[in-house]
Each structure stands twice: as C-alpha cells, then as structure tokens.
Image: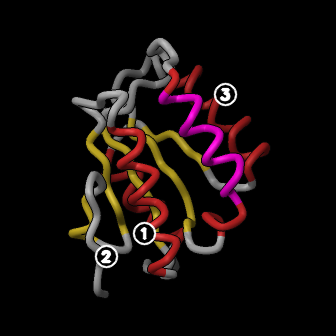
Amino acid sequence: MLAPALKLLDPDDFPLVRLDATDWQPAHGRALIDDLETLIEHGQPFVLIIQNGAGGNQKRTEDDKTRMLWFKANNQRLATCCRGIFTVLTDATDQPRAEKQTAGLSAAMGLRFQVFADADQAETEARRALNLG
C-alpha cells in the first residue's frame, strides 16, 4: 500500500505508522498534527504505534495543550481512518497510570487508545484492528 509522505511519523510499514518518542521535543507537536492531517487526507485506514512514550509522567507544555485541542476538534475526522493509537511502554511502573489515561482518552474522543508492554504485542493488535491478521 502506498504510504503518504510524512515529516515526523514513519510510514515505511504503512498502514502501521510509527513514532519513536525517545527524543520527543515540544516543537514536534506541530509536525505530528501536520502528519495526522496528511493521513486523514490520504484516507486509508492506519494505526499509530508510539514507541518509548513518556507514559504521562512528563510536565505538560503549551504544545501538549495545542495538540490535545487539535485531537478534541478533529477526533471525528481522525476516527474515519485511524483504527487506534497504541503506545508501547516497556517500564512496568508507567503502565497503570498510562492505562487509566488511555481509557479516559478513548471514552472522551471516540478513538481507540491502548497501552502495550512490548512492540510485538502492539503490532499484533494493530494488525487485528486493521483486519490484517
């Protein structure tokens, strides 16, 4: 399947789209929004897998607020093609807090947010969400 050109997200395994958040900077928020807009315009189902997410332990910034406002305003558009946003957290101490946050996000936004302990598990579930296996 032909992948769209993206600035921040890695579409090489489209419809699995990946973000390595190891070196996440607040300035990346605008590029993430631009990439999500591109994916919406592309119109093909996808799952976003975030590797090395912070698990909700980082200090919130103005960029975070902007990103969350975009998600809130565009959740229905995003839901037309996004089958899930999956975060891989390998630190077990981050899991409970992140799972609680993602449950709230899923309910509030109508998008499937989920946390996984390893990348293989997230990829397997992403393929299921896309009916790929």
Whether the residues at callouts 3 and 2 have beta carbons within 8 Å, the answer is: no
For image coordinates 31% across by 48% down, the residue present is: 19
Mark 3 or 2, nearer chain start: 2
Q: Which residue is mark 2?
A: 4
Give above or below for 71 relative to 103.
below
Mark 1 or 3, nearer chain start: 1
For image coordinates 26% across by 71% down, the residue present is: 5
Q: Amino acid at mark 1?
A: Thr
Q: Which residue is mark 3?
A: 100
Q: Position of residue 78 (x, y in %)?
A: 61, 64
Eye-nearest disc, 3 or 2: 2
The verdict on residue 71 being magenta is yes
The verdict on residue 112 being magenta is no
Residue at the farthest right position: 108
Give above or below for 12 relative to 9.
below
For the record, the magenta segment spans 63-75
Q: Provide the secondary structure element on which disc 3 rests.
A: helix
Q: Give the number of the disc on residue 38.
A: 1
Number of marks present in the image shown: 3
For image coordinates 65% across by 40% down, the residue present is: 69
Whether the residues at callouts 2 and 1 have beta carbons within 8 Å, the answer is: yes
